[in-house]
Image (tube, rainbow, N blue to C red):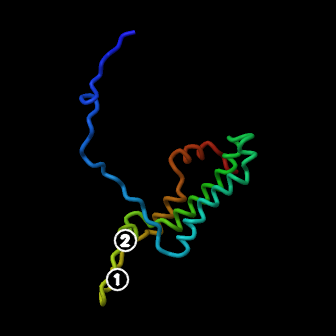
Amino acid sequence: MSSTLVREGSSQQVDSKPNASIAPVAVIDTPLSKSAALLRPSLILGLLALRFNALVADPVSTLQLALPATALIQVLYAIICLPVAGSQSAKASRKPRPGEKRKVDPNGPNTISVWLSLFSPSPDMREQLRGWSFH
C-alpha cells in the first residue's frame, strides 16, 4: 500500500462565478389553472396509492398500466396551467398605468402550429406505418 499526499487547497478550487439559474415558469393566474396545479400531485399520488399492492408485487406492469393516466394528467396540466412559450404571460407582468391600453401579444399561441405539432406523426412513426397494409 502506498500513500500519497494530496494538498486540499490546490486540488479543489472554488469557482467564484455565480451560476446562471433558470427561473421557474409561473402558473397562469386563473382559478382553474391554480386549482389544477394543486390537484395534479394529489391525483398522481392517489393513483399510485390506489395501486400500491400491485406496484409492490409487479412494479413494471403496474407502472406501464399507470402510464397513460399519468401522461393524461401531465398533458392536461401543461395545457391548463402553463403559458405558451414566449408569450407575454410567461414574462413578468407589470400593472398597466391608468389610461394605458393593453398591448396585443404578437407571439400568442398559433393554433395551427399547436395542432400540427400534437397530431403529426414523427419520422419514426411514418417508417413504421409504411410497413402496415390498410385494406
Residue sitting nearer the eye, 17 or 3: 3
Q: Considering only order in the chain, which callout, 2 or 1, is on the residue closer to the N terminus?
A: 2
Q: Is residue 9 above or below residue 58?
A: above
113 left or right of 67?
Answer: left
Q: Residue at x 48, y 64 (%)?
A: 114
Could you say whether the residue bearing mark 1 is in a helix, strand or loop? loop
Name the quarter where the N terminus is drawn: top left
The residue under label 2 is 88
- CA neighbours of label 2 inside 10 A, class few (<14), some (14 to 19), many (20+): some
Name the image quarter holding residue 50.
bottom right
Q: Residue at x 35, y 69 (%)?
A: 92
Residue sitting nearer the eye, 30 or 84: 30
Horizontal and vertical percent for residue 108?
A: 40, 71
Q: Disc 1 marks which amino acid? A: Arg
Residue sitting nearer the eye, 51 or 1: 1
Tell me the distance, in whole angstroms, between the alpha carbons under discs 1 and 2: 11 Å
Residue at the extreme top of the image, as rendered = 1
Q: Is residue 122 above or below residue 26?
A: above
Name the image quarter holding residue 3.
top left
- CA neighbours of label 1 inside 10 A, class few (<14), some (14 to 19), many (20+): few
Q: Disc 2 marks which amino acid? A: Gln
Horizontal and vertical percent for residue 23?
A: 37, 58
The residue under label 1 is 102
